[in-house]
Image (spheres, grey):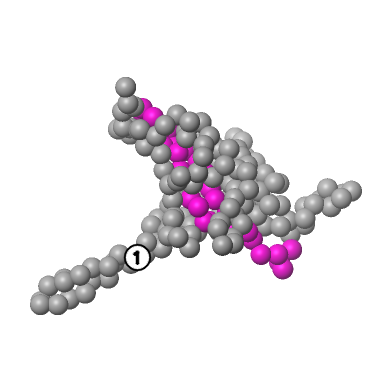
Amino acid sequence: MPNTADKVKFNIKKLHYAVLTNGATPTWATPVAIPGTVSFSLDPQGDTTPFYADGVVYYQSVANNGYSGDLEVADFPASFLKDVFGIAEGTTSKVLTENSKVEPKPVALLFEEEGDSTGTKYVLYNCSCTRPKRSFATQTDSKEPSTQTVTVTSVPLSDGKVMAMTGADTPTATLTAWYTKVFEEGATV
């Protein structure tokens, strides 16, 4: 019996990143978990351009330039900072040092959104992230955790792929393997 489609969605979880290697064919490192996802808002990027002829919109083009938005987590792990932003860790001091001359690496972001039936797993194939925004505040009468936010820009790969997502009929093998490697249509699970 096939799964039923979700009626509602809630709760983002299981955020992972996988560093992208750009070459003739994009490849990704093994996904690494980022625990503590708070929120992820994505706005579509691209324009709709009408072409007028005969007094009407004769043709309309739509550009899909990916997405951009903010990703908020409890605390980005050192592995993310080192892998993506090239932050170096001292051999003996174990102090993390940021270097302005190091370019951030593009990543795939994998995550899922729960639903009332099956939920949906996502992969954004080609993302760049800003360095984490940090807020520091004094503690008052109650303890309120600080969070960190990065701005994410997801652009199409050279073949046009931007994002993939699972559905109610996605096979169990694909769902189970989602975080073992970045999903590519036609690749062996």
Q: In which quarter of the image is residue 61?
A: bottom left
Indicate whether residue 85 is drawn in magenta: no
Q: Residue at x 50, y 52 (%)?
A: 125
Q: Answer whether residue 5 is visible to the viewer in this image.
A: yes
Q: Where is residue 6 in the image (x, y as percent from the top left)?
A: 33, 32
Which of these two is toward me, 177 or 116? Answer: 177
Please identify the quadrant where the N terminus is shown: top left
Q: Name the residue under label 1.
A: 63
Which of these two is toward me, 74 or 120? Answer: 120
Q: How crowded is mark 1: few (under 14 residues within 10 Å), some or many (20 or more)?
A: few
Residue numbers of the magenta segment: 99-127
Q: Which residue is drawn at 70% across and 46% down?
A: 79
What amino acid does circle 1 point to?
Ala
Q: Where is residue 102 in the image (x, y as percent from the top left)?
A: 70, 64
In the picture provided, is 141 more to the left or to the right than 64?
A: right
Q: Where is residue 141 in the image (x, y as percent from the top left)?
A: 61, 36
